[in-house]
Image (cartoon, rainbow, N blue to C red):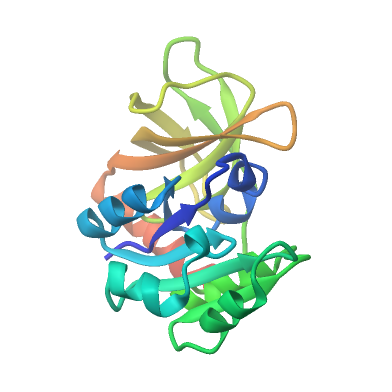
């Protein structure tokens, strides 16, 4: 079952500014701008964690739990603008966690702990795209199911094309078919895309599995 996370914020740019904190963690990311969006996503997806900008609509933890049920876990990113009593209702309830500003990398670390995601050692790799116009990009996060890639050109979410790359300390080039499932602007003059592998040869799948085992501790 995938690690599915919902980012809840009335102002989506809050999480766009922090997008790089989540793209390298092997989680499926969805956004919600209001409680209706949140309810819909939790009702249709196996959501494990909701990360909220502040307390959702100012609701106390017990009231929100009544609306959402016993799961998923909640991570509230609190600030000086939030009602301290409302924050305390989350802070003192099992299944809910509160982080106060400045957040920094504590968001990544806490998310990793709450989802029990193993720590990975990332390796920067050159990836060639075999699509209209071709092109090269760089990947740091690759797993059995996909990768995060950064490149200068724009891609269309939903498009599919072959890519090729060489794994470290592994002979031969891997060539798989990938689908673009997520786009996020980078901190540099480039684009970042989440790619999902839709066609992998059995021998390449084993090579990816070996990398996955050796890069996780």
Give me the residue at 47% from left, 46% from top.
147
Spot the residue most to the left.
Answer: 44
Give me the residue at 57% from left, 53% from top.
168
Give whichever of 85, 5 is nearer the camera: 85
Up the image or down, 60 lies above or below 4; here it is: below
Q: Is residue 58 visible?
A: yes
Up the image or down, 2 lies above or below 133; here it is: below
Give whichever of 157, 207 is nearer the camera: 157
Up the image or down, 205 lies above or below 71; here it is: above
Q: Quadrant of the C terminus?
A: bottom right
Give whichever of 108, 132 is nearer the camera: 108
Spot the residue most to the right.
Answer: 102
Give me the residue at 54% from left, 50% from top.
23
Q: Place residue 161 in its image quadrant.
A: top left
Give me the residue at 78% from left, 65% from top.
102
Instruction: Find residue 210 and report its horizontal and vertical position in percent.
Output: 42, 64
Q: Is residue 200 left or right of residue 107?
A: left
Instruction: Report how many numbered discs are placed on residues in the image.
Output: 0
Q: Is residue 28 left or right of residue 66?
A: right
Instruction: Find residue 199 and report its horizontal and vertical position in percent.
Output: 26, 39
Q: Place residue 86 in its image quadrant.
A: bottom right
Q: Quadrant of the N terminus?
A: bottom left
Q: Is residue 204 visible?
A: no
Instruction: Find residue 49 and report its horizontal and vertical position in percent.
Output: 42, 67
Spot the residue most to the top.
Answer: 133
Instruction: Find residue 38 and report its horizontal and vertical position in percent.
Output: 35, 54
């Amino acid at each position: 079952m995938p690690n599915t996370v919902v980012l809840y914020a009335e102002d989506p740019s809050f999480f766009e500014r922090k997008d790089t904190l989540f793209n390298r963690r092997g989680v499926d990311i969805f956004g919600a701008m209001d409680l209706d969006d949140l309810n819909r996503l939790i009702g249709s997806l196996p959501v494990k964690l909701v990360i909220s900008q502040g307390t959702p609509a100012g609701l106390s933890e017990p009231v929100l739990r009544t609306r959402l049920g016993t799961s998923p876990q909640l991570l509230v990113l609190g600030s000086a603008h939030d009602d301290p009593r409302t924050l305390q209702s989350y802070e003192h309830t099992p299944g809910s966690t509160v982080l106060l500003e400045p957040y920094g990398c504590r968001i990544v670390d806490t998310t990793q702990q709450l989802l029990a995601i193993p720590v990975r050692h990332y390796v920067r790799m050159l990836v060639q795209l075999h699509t209209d116009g071709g092109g090269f990009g760089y990947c740091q996060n690759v797993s059995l199911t996909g990768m995060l890639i950064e490149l200068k050109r724009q891609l269309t979410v939903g498009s599919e094309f072959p890519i090729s790359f060489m794994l470290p300390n592994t002979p031969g080039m891997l060539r798989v078919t990938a689908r673009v499932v997520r786009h996020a602007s980078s901190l540099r003059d480039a684009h970042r895309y989440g790619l999902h592998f839709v066609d992998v040869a059995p021998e390449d799948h084993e090579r990816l599995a070996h990398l996955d085992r050796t890069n996780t501790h």
